Image (cartoon, coloured by chain):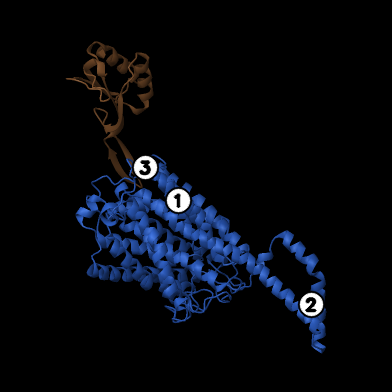
Amino acid sequence: MKKIEAIIQPHKLEDAKEALKNIGVDGMTITEVRGHGRQKGHTEVYRGMEYRVDLLPKVKLEMVVPDQRSDEVIRTLAVAARTGKIGDGKIFVYEVADAVRIRNDDRGDAAL
Amino acid sequence: MRNPSFPRLRAFGSAAARKFTQIRCLPFLTLLMFSAGVSLAQSIPPDIAKKLDDLDKAAKSAQMAGDNAWMLTSSALVLMMTGPGLALFYGGLVRKKNVLSTMMHSFILMATVSILWAVIGYSLAFAEGSPFIGDFRYVFLHGVGADPNADYGATIPHQTYMIYQLMFAIITPALISGAFAERMKFSAMLLFMTLWSLVVYFPMAHMVWGKGGLLNAALGGKYPAFDFAGGTVVHITSGVSALICALYLGKRSNYPDESMRPHSVVLSVIGACLLWVGWFGFNAGSAVAAGSLASSAFIATHFATAAAVLGWMAMEWMVAGKPSVLGAISGAVAGLVAITPASGFVKPMPAILIGLAAGVVCYLMVSKVKQMFGYDDSLDAFGVHGMGGTLGALLTGIFATKEVNDLRMGKPMGLVDGDAGQVLNQLIAVLIAWGLAIVGTLVILKICDVVCGVRASKEQETEGLDLSMHGEEGYNLES
């Protein structure tokens, strides 16, 4: 099993969700996060006071998929969340040791 | 100008009302002239005298109903400026850990000052006394009843005048709180506001609006200053005291290195709009009647505010590159402040000039001068109210005209009427307001510091005053 964690632009969330639904991924967790990579931030001015805003709003999607599906999901996500501009975000992939469905104790791929 | 020394017959000013009056009153007028002629030789027959008396009473009662309705409405409008108006305006400008404490600064004064006003405040401000402060004749509202006080408002109950004035006494100290937001102890703030009302506000209100006050332009002041709705009494006193508070308390910890962005300009926009609407009660209500002077003040207020919004926005757009929403609403408040003393004395075009000047000057104050000197007037109470109030008070001396307010019975009012001396009177009032605010505030802060300490501890400030002072948070989104 692989855990796929994607940090993307908030306005691309709907596109990403739609694309994942189309390839049959129906479980995910979404968090509103803030951060920056190379994009850095922007400057805001309030009554002449300049504030450097480094951490920008992003959305983090997390999902765990069977090993054989992981490449397909990663490709789909990358295409759906891409604008081609700096700040589009990143995708991280982790090995997952096990999974448990709390309702009925299913384990491994069966729990996904 | 809380001064009804000229009769308020304007209440029947509309064309329709005039026509109605002419038609209906013609027989009575004839009768009146006839009886006046006859009375030289013999007294009026008792039945006609009674009819005239009844007519007189009915006319007075009708005028009182109209004026009183407007003044009660205005009173409510001015209270709305403090809560929610100012509470939202200031609340949005602080960090979210201080939103409740900042709103509380405004809200709690709606209670504290009210009680103080009933016990002694109204008497100190509006009872006849010395040129500097009133005596004790109205303590516990003794003698403040349904009968009008002819000096202040001949066509409204004295009680209405009293409650209307209370709303000014509430918002004035609330304005100061912008300067010490996010770092003053709540207990110290309560003590400060109580003493400040007693030492600064009540005497200043008495000097400008009270009968026999030193600066009263209508009721026997030595230096008659024009302050229609509170440029000196409200905005200079609060704005200058705010500067003293900011200097005395010192900067917020980590200012200006840590980000202290407003947590919600949205709240501030709503607050500013409520202030704009409420200000019609503040300025037009200061005519103390529902006549044409109220209309004139209403209109001057509105146009000055519109001009100030555009003035501030244009400056910011040119200087900083972008026209911000916070800039636009700050401009509105600056314009409202500056037109306050002038609103019942100037025509619409000078009002636009006053507003425009306020937008430009106040923008430069808060965005350039403040940073040059480095003081932390957190929400710009001095930059907007102190400077806007001073500017407005001085410009009133220039643009006041008898065409709007014939207070001096045909004699010139301001510089545009040809009386340069009024500018000097305005300057005297400005200096007295500045002086009283500086000295009074310093002494009071020192007292508060000795009694309970004015500044929140570093830990309390870091945690946020909402939690450390009030044990609450403004936004519990998970609950």
Of residues B415 and A5, the one drawn nearer to the viewer in this rendering: A5
Q: What tint does the image give chain B?
A: blue
**Amino acid beneath label 2:** Leu
Which percent across, then down, holds residue B30?
82, 74
Which residue is denoted by mark 3 in the rendering? Answer: B320
Residue at mark 2 to residue at mark 3: CA–CA distance:
68 Å
Give me the residue at 19% from left, 20% from top.
A98
What residue do we see at 30% from left, 58% from top? B180
Structural crowding at the residue carrying mark 1, measured as other residues with C-alpha within 10 Å and reported as few (<14), some (14–19) or many (≥20)? many
Q: Colour of chain A?
A: brown
Looking at the picture, how far across and down is residue B348, in whole percent? 57, 56
> Residue under circle 1?
B272
Taking the view exactly as shown, the residue that stands out farthest to the front is: A104
Residue topped by disc 2 = B32
- The answer to whether residue A12 is visible is no
Helix, strand or loop at label 3? It is helix
Q: 10 Å neighbourhood of mark 2: few (<14), some, or many (≥20)?
A: some
